[in-house]
């Protein structure tokens, strides 16, 4: 019985020490997930320029190009977010109802 208790104590101390010195992973230097559409408020000037360059290069290649839309106001962003959420809730309800 004494051997069992000493073994348990040894394992316990070993685990505590190993957990104390365990290397924690460093945080990632970038976002793991993309922001939701209503979390995007503005696009940086450099990104706008790169998008214009991309559109111009597609036009020179003869591929289809879309005209860039003007930026949305905060009210329009909130309205779009509410619409997306409403449609998604309806979809989930319909999916849940069909699943039964």
Image (cartoon, rainbow, N blue to C red):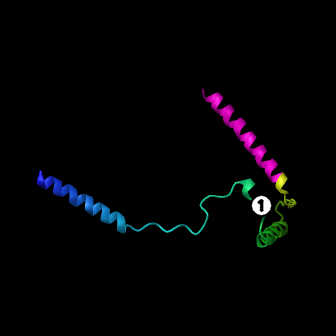
Q: Is residue 89 positioned above or below 80 on the image?
A: above
Crowding at mark 1 (Cα within 10 Å: few <14, some 14-19, many 20+)? few
Q: Toward which corner of the image does residue 82 lie, by quadrant?
A: top right
Q: Does the magenta stretch include residue 79?
A: yes
Q: How many labels does the image show?
A: 1
* Rendering coords of residue 16 (x, y %): 31, 62
The residue at the point 12 percent across, 54 percent down is: 2
* Rendering coords of residue 12 (x, y %): 26, 58
Secondary element at image label 1: loop
Q: In which quarter of the image is the C terminus?
A: top right
Boundaries of the magenta span:
76-100
Q: Is residue 45 positioned above or below 91 on the image?
A: below
Residue at numbered disc 1: 41
Q: In this orientation, which residue lies closer to the viewer: 25 or 6? A: 6
* Rendering coords of residue 1 (x, y %): 12, 50
Query: Residue pushed farthest top?
Result: 100
Q: In this orientation, which residue lies closer to the viewer: 28 or 54? A: 28
* Relative horizontal placement of residue 99, taking residue 10 as reference (left or right): right
Q: Does the magenta stretch include residue 95?
A: yes
The residue at the point 59 percent across, 61 percent down is: 32
* Rendering coords of residue 48 (x, y %): 80, 69
Q: Is residue 87 positioned above or below 36 on the image?
A: above
Majority SS type along the magenta span: helix
Q: Toward which corner of the image does residue 7 lie, by quadrant?
A: bottom left
* Relative horizontal placement of residue 21, taking residue 94 as reference (left or right): left
């Amino acid at each position: 019985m004494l051997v069992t208790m000493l073994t348990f104590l040894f394992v316990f101390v070993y685990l505590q020490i190993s957990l104390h010195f365990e290397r924690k992973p460093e945080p990632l230097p970038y976002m793991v997930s993309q922001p939701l559409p209503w979390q995007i408020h503005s696009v940086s000037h450099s990104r706008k320029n790169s998008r214009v360059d991309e559109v111009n290069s597609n036009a020179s290649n003869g591929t289809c190009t879309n005209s860039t839309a003007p930026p949305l106001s905060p009210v329009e962003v909130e309205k779009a977010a509410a619409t997306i959420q409403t449609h998604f809730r309806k979809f989930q309800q319909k999916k849940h109802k069909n699943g039964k």
